[in-house]
Image (cartoon, rainbow, N blue to C red):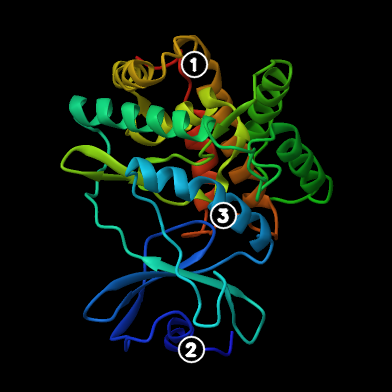
Amino acid sequence: MNTSLSEICGGFITAPVLSVQPLGGGNINDTYLADTGNGIFVLQRLQKAMDTRKLTYNYELYSPLFGKEGIAFPKWLNTREGGYFLRDRSGGAWRMYSYIEGDILTPPLEKAELYSCGRGLGKMHLLLSRLPRSPKAVYPKLHDLEHYYDRFLHTLQSKAEANDRDMGTEKKLHDLVLRHLSEKCGRNDIIHGDPKLGNIIFQGGSVKGFIDLDTVMTGSAAEDAADCIRSCCVKDGTLDRDAAYTLLDAYISVTGNTHIRDDVPRSFDKICCELALRYYTDSVSSEKVFREKYPGYHLERAKALLSLSWEAQG
């Protein structure tokens, strides 16, 4: 990188930075917490493939609406020279925003928390549906199962004799992917794209806002809700369907979208299959999308996700 984190911070703010520490365990961007003593900021180095023009276009679409409705979200700082992004000496793009305080919740959630989560997701979907224009997909292939399957097949072609392949897992993936590809799912909603529990800001038991909005895109509201359920209604490898329906009932109370109750079970299985496929492909590929937290992590995640099914759980 050849540029210190303090130098990067100085491109956005004038206050001296007391410390810069890694923040969170995200799979994509490098994220840090910068403390000035008088304010705390989040500093992020973006993936090289991310198009800052699309990011800016989307940000300027949703930020006025979210701000007007009082939904907390990362409000990007301008660099001292203008614009939202700063380039380091190696060409990497950085952005910075004030840290948003919130409660840290982990599954299983209390019933009231689940209800708040569903209402918060529903409110966000309603607001996104009011955007004056459609967002530009920063990740055009996100949730494109056929795209991930093609990568999976291409990777296996170059690994024919490799001893790190798991044939049982591969067969399950083939069978599930082909089943899901034969199904049709509406994708005309504007969604968050990654509404996992860690991207939802709670305060006092209610949803305060959302982070990681780089994935805002046109897609399926049912898949968005299913992904949220996957992150907060699964404990020890088991889906709690009662918890999932509590979240969905709350979502419906805000949006009036009763169809989602019927659409989410299929979408839940598809989302789990999609993620399993991505993690397994990473496990046998030299090019990783998700960070490997420890040896065998990708295969372990793939198997865990394959074991999840809406109908199979009690």
Between 66 and 44, the one lying in front of the other is 66
Q: Nearer the viewer, mark 2 or mark 1?
A: 2
- The disc placed on residue 4 is 2
* Mark toward the start of the polypeptide (2 vs 1): 2
**Image quarter of residue 291:** bottom right
Determine crowd level at label 2: few under 14, some 14-19, many 20+ residues with C-alpha closer than 10 A: few
State the residue at coordinates (75%, 38%). 147
The x, y position of residue 252, in whole percent, is 38, 16
Q: Please tell me whether residue 58 is drawn above or below residue 234 in the rendered image.
A: below
Between 64 and 287, the one lying in front of the other is 64
Residue type at mark 1: give it: Pro
Q: Is residue 135 left or right of residue 212?
A: right
Real-space Cα distance between discs 2 and 3?
A: 25 Å
**Image quarter of residue 171:** top right
SS assignment at label 3: loop
The x, y position of residue 110, in whole percent, is 19, 29
Between 267 and 167, the one lying in front of the other is 267
State the residue at coordinates (79%, 49%). 161
Tell me, yes or no, if residue 188 can be seen here.
Answer: yes
Q: Nearer the viewer, mark 2 or mark 3?
A: 2
**In the rendered structure, are the residues bearing label 2 and label 3 in contact, judged by CB atoms less than 8 Å apart?**
no
* Mark toward the start of the polypeptide (2 vs 3): 2
Q: Please tell me whether residue 37 is drawn above or below residue 41 in the rendered image.
A: below
SS assignment at label 2: loop
State the residue at coordinates (29%, 16%). 242
Residue type at mark 2: give it: Ser
- The disc placed on residue 290 is 3
* Mark toward the start of the polypeptide (1 vs 3): 1
Real-space Cα distance between discs 2 and 1?
A: 47 Å
Q: Please tell me whether residue 85 is drawn above or below residue 140 in the rendered image.
A: below
State the residue at coordinates (46%, 14%). 257
Disc 1 target residue: 265
